[in-house]
Image (cartoon, rainbow, N blue to C red):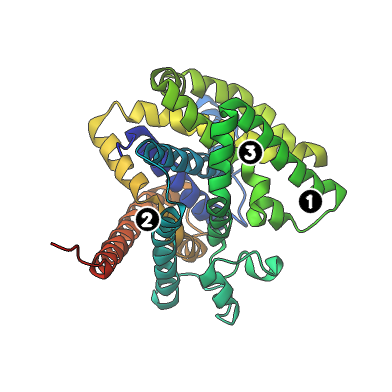
Amino acid sequence: MKRLLWIDISKGLAILFVAYFHFCSTYFQHGVLPPADWSNLAASVLTILRLVWSKVSGLGFHAVGVFIILSGWTLMQSTMRRAESGPLAWGRWYRARFLRLYPMYWVAHLVYLVSPFVARLEPVDSRIILSLLGLRFIDIQMNFMYLNAAWWYFSMLIQFYLIFPLLFWAARQLGPWWFLIIACAAGFFARYILLVAWPQNGLWVLGGFAICRLPEFALGISLAMLHRRSDARVEWFLLRGAGFVLGLILYPAALQLYHGLYEYIFVDFATGACCMLEIVGIAGLISLLHSPAKLFGVVGVYSYGLYLIHQPYVIWLGLRIREVPIWMFLLICIPTLAVLSAWGMLLEKATNTLVNKLVSQRKPARAA
């Protein structure tokens, strides 16, 4: 299957933004910006830059919504290609997904347990069994954020993969627009029940109950279908500035949805979509530059490994550099993210190679 470079670049930008957000939030958790200084032009510019940096840095968690959208897109794209060559063998499909997700997830647990320079904020106890199984939504308050808080995404992802055959069938029967409308209605209704009608722990809405994030996942599925029909039109909108400008205009309105209980029903979808338009728009610009495109594309290809291992490292380091000035933090951040990207890439590539080798050895030899 032909990979779309700009999607890999978008994934690379999104995971770097998430890792940066976790690093920045740890570093800046108990800090405050220097007081505003409007006494002269230079001081005013620095004040504005600090304020913009603080606001943009605080939006890093919206890139999780971008990953949900792009996950729906790439999964739908690859499955449609397989369906074109013949009937889908869903048993083999599930097996391929299992081998893609779980081995690296288990390696990330091992790395967490044996690596130095990681933040260990909780004891290793019996909860690790549910974590290894990916069932972190069981006793959600105790398990969802256990050991490595970023792993909550995995438990949401396996729920989406479990119901994906149903989503795939529905999308092909209904078409991209009706599918998106119905999926959004289901997701918003689930959020209404858990937020308003029968208030529950907010972790269920975050992703403990995957249907609450179905609108973003369905948006990715619908975009993949639209791209399949008219790739030039979709890519022109997303990559050539129109989508970026639209996201920039709509982002302030999306942020206002945080300010009310009923409005919060729609906030993850709105902020995720706006952040996606910004990140994909930047990816479109980067894709025009050969070396940066190749670099960010590789980070995107192996973004899963970086996602699984980054948070304990950046928390460990962030706790130790809280006293340094902002400019020094930014200088430290660049090589830190580069090293973590390389480490995650090495782990994921080695894990995939080993899994592929073991699987190929177990295949029965064909008769001559």
Per the rendering, the mark at residue 336 is: 2
Closer mark to the observer between disc 3 and disc 2: 3
Please state the horizontal and vertical placement of residue 300, each as a whole percent of the image: 36, 45
Q: Secondary structure at mark 2?
A: helix
| Amino acid type, label 3 | Pro
What residue would you read off at disc 1? 194
Please state the horizontal and vertical placement of residue 354, each as a whole percent of the image: 27, 66
| Amino acid type, label 2 | Thr
Q: Secondary structure at mark 3?
A: helix
Toward the bottom, the furthest residue is 125
Which of pointers 2 and 1 lies earlier in the amino acid sequence? 1
Other residues around mark 2 within 10 Å, as few (<14) / some (14–19) / many (≥20): some
Whether residue 36 is visible to the viewer of this picture, yes or no, is no
Q: CA distance from mark 2 to mark 1?
A: 38 Å
Q: Please, is residue 294 above or below residue 207 in the view?
A: above
What residue would you read off at disc 3? 215
Q: Please, is residue 175 above or below residue 221 in the view?
A: above
Tell me if label 3 and label 2 are in contact, CB under 8 Å: no
| Amino acid type, label 1 | Leu
